[in-house]
Image (cartoon, rainbow, N blue to C red):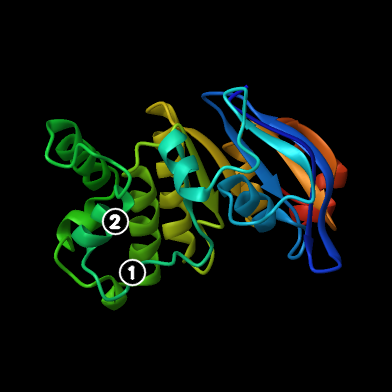
Amino acid sequence: MLLEVEGLCVNYGHIEAIRDISFGVPEGTVTTLIGANGAGKTTTLKTISGLRKVRAGAVRFEGRDITTIAPYDRVKLGISQSPEGRRCFVGMTVRENLQMGAFTRKDRKSQAYRDDIDRVLALFPRLAERIDQVAGTMSGGEQQMLAMGRALMSRPRLLLLDEPSMGLAPKLIAQIFSIVTEINQQGTTVLLVEQNAMQALKRSHDAHILETGSIVRSGRGADLAGDPAVKAAYLGGDL
């Protein structure tokens, strides 16, 4: 198990955002968290990244307790996040954004670093076309590609993706999810938060459903996608 979350509780002031959730992310898989707005999905990812403090419970990565480790040290360990809303550095170029994704690396003059730039540009050819364009002038879909590419530049073993399809046209959504599958097939484990449950479950090995801060169902992605109750609640009654 690459990532283990055990008995996790997180508050915003006096409000419980996550209550006693436990799940694992097996190495080499795509694992998805689905649920309505406010269910606690983004808070879970932020807590794994170290951006939210834990009230109770533990986060372990490769068997090591990282619950109190600083966010930048988690990046060094191999955890990287593409956040909800993309959060690109809008005044910087595509190239500079990718360089920022590698801020913890000490090999930025190496062939390995150049190979990783080439990998990102191969995954996202549009970024190669826009390499010297300022990020703030690009479309939402292009900025989403950039956010994902930036996260990959730290060479993560675990990639956290928060709502990668948000606000995108259907054609771009299909493209983004195909790239998620390709990233996973290249060896990166993915923990995906996504409101497009149909696409997410179809491409996930495992999935967990959150409601008001608690996990209420877990299973194989394909099994949950075929469950009538899950279809009715999250997939519009039809897959």
In the rendered image, residue 189, in percent from the top left (x then y), is placed at: 50, 31
Q: Which residue is mark 1?
A: 89
Q: Label 2: few (<14), some or many (≥20) within 10 Å?
A: some
Please indicate whether residue 212 sits to the left or right of residue 156 in the image.
right
The residue depicted at 57 percent of the width and 24 percent of the height is 62
Is 70 above or below relative to 164?
above
Secondary structure, mark 2, is helix
Q: Residue type at mark 1?
A: Phe
Disc 1 to disc 2, how far (Cα)?
9 Å
Of residues 122 and 110, the one drawn nearer to the viewer in this rendering: 110
In the rendered image, residue 128, in percent from the top left (x then y), is placed at: 17, 54
The residue depicted at 61 percent of the width and 24 percent of the height is 26
| Disc 1 and disc 2 in contact, CB within 8 angstroms | yes
The residue depicted at 44 percent of the width and 42 percent of the height is 75
Q: Quadrant of the N terminus?
A: top right
Q: Which residue is mark 2?
A: 100
Is 224 above or below relative to 26?
below
Please indicate whether residue 118 sits to the left or right of residue 54 in the image.
left
Q: Residue type at mark 2?
A: Met
Name the quadrant containing residue 7. Answer: top right
Of residues 186 and 60, the one drawn nearer to the viewer in this rendering: 60
In the rendered image, residue 212, in percent from the top left (x then y), is placed at: 85, 58
State how many labels appear.
2
Q: Label 1: few (<14), some or many (≥20) within 10 Å?
A: some
Of residues 20 and 93, the one drawn nearer to the viewer in this rendering: 20
Q: Is residue 225 visible from the viewing direction of this image?
A: no
Name the quadrant containing residue 219. Answer: top right
Q: Is residue 118 visible from the viewing direction of this image?
A: yes
